[in-house]
């Protein structure tokens, strides 16, 4: 490593989010080649960190975000639109070597995913909106849903560390 900074995309691209693959040699990004467009043009790309070689992995039909990589490194997850919007709603699982994501929450939860984290054992914990309340849900590695809700569930950002899950909540005054 030279410590030299280099661009991995063309200057005309807009990159909104990146997530490193566990091999450290590749990253996944949400980006567009046409940021000036008034249509949704964001896509999911894989990028080799050494060469900047870019490969289109998937082009969602609507808005999406919250790209993360499973702890096993074999799945790219993101919160996406079931059809074409208007808002990202469901948790999608895209196999790294796959061509089509699977909607994990569409049929079994059908509520907007606010935050989620991968567990070391392949579980996914999430907070979903349910009207003016939230629910805390977990899926095991076989996609079996478990409601973990204590009422009311705090809302906010989530982070995982080892076997612990942290939820940052806004301070109410």
Image (spheres, rainbow, N blue to C red):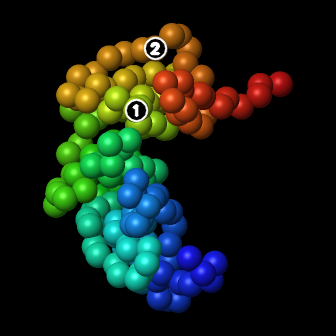
Where residue 22 appears, x then y in whole percent? 40, 53
Q: Which residue lies at the image location 29% right of the left edge and 75% below the top edge?
A: 55
| C-alpha span from label 2 to label 1 | 21 Å
The residue sitting at the left extreme is: 99
Q: Which mark is residue 98?
A: none
The answer to whether mark 2 and mark 1 are in CB contact below 8 A is no
Number of the front mark, 2 or 1 = 1
Say which label, 2 or 1, has the lower sequence index.
1
Image quarter of the N terminus: bottom right
At mark 1, the secondary structure is loop
Judging depth in this view, the residue of 119 and 36 nearest the camera is 119
Q: For residue 146, what is the image quadrant?
A: top left
The residue sitting at the top extreme is: 150
Residue 8 makes an appearance in the image: yes
Where residue 5 appears, x then y in whole percent? 61, 82
Q: Which residue lies at the image location 19% right of the left edge and 59% below the top edge?
A: 97
Q: Residues within 10 Å of mark 2 (few under 14, many from 20)?
A: some
Image quarter of the C terminus: top right
Where residue 76 appears, x then y in whole percent? 32, 52
At mark 2, the secondary structure is loop
Residue 87 makes an appearance in the image: no
Q: Which mark is residue 149?
A: 2
- 110 shown above or below 26: above
Judging depth in this view, the residue of 9 and 153 nearest the camera is 9
Report the residue marked by disc 1: 120
Q: Which residue lies at the image location 33% right of the left edge and 60% below the top edge?
A: 62
Figure disc tally: 2
- 27 shown above or below 163: below
């Amino acid at each position: 490593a030279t410590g030299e900074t280099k661009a991995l995309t063309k200057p005309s691209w807009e990159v909104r989010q990146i997530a490193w693959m566990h091999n450290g040699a590749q990253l996944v990004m949400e980006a567009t080649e046409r940021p000036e467009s008034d249509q949704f043009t964001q896509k999911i790309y894989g990028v080799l960190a050494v060469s900047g070689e870019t490969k289109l992995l998937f082009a969602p039909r609507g808005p999406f975000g919250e790209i993360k990589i499973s702890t096993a490194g074999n799945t790219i997850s993101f919160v996406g639109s079931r059809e074409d919007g208007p808002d990202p709603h469901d948790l999608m699982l895209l196999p790294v070597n796959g061509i089509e994501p699977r909607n994990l929450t569409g049929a079994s939860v059908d509520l907007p995913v606010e935050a989620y984290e991968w567990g070391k054992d392949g579980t996914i914990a999430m907070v979903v909106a349910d009207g003016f309340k939230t629910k805390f849900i977990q899926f095991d590695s076989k996609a079996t849903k478990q409601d973990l809700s204590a009422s009311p569930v705090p809302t906010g950002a989530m982070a995982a560390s080892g076997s612990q899950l942290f939820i940052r909540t806004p301070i109410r005054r």
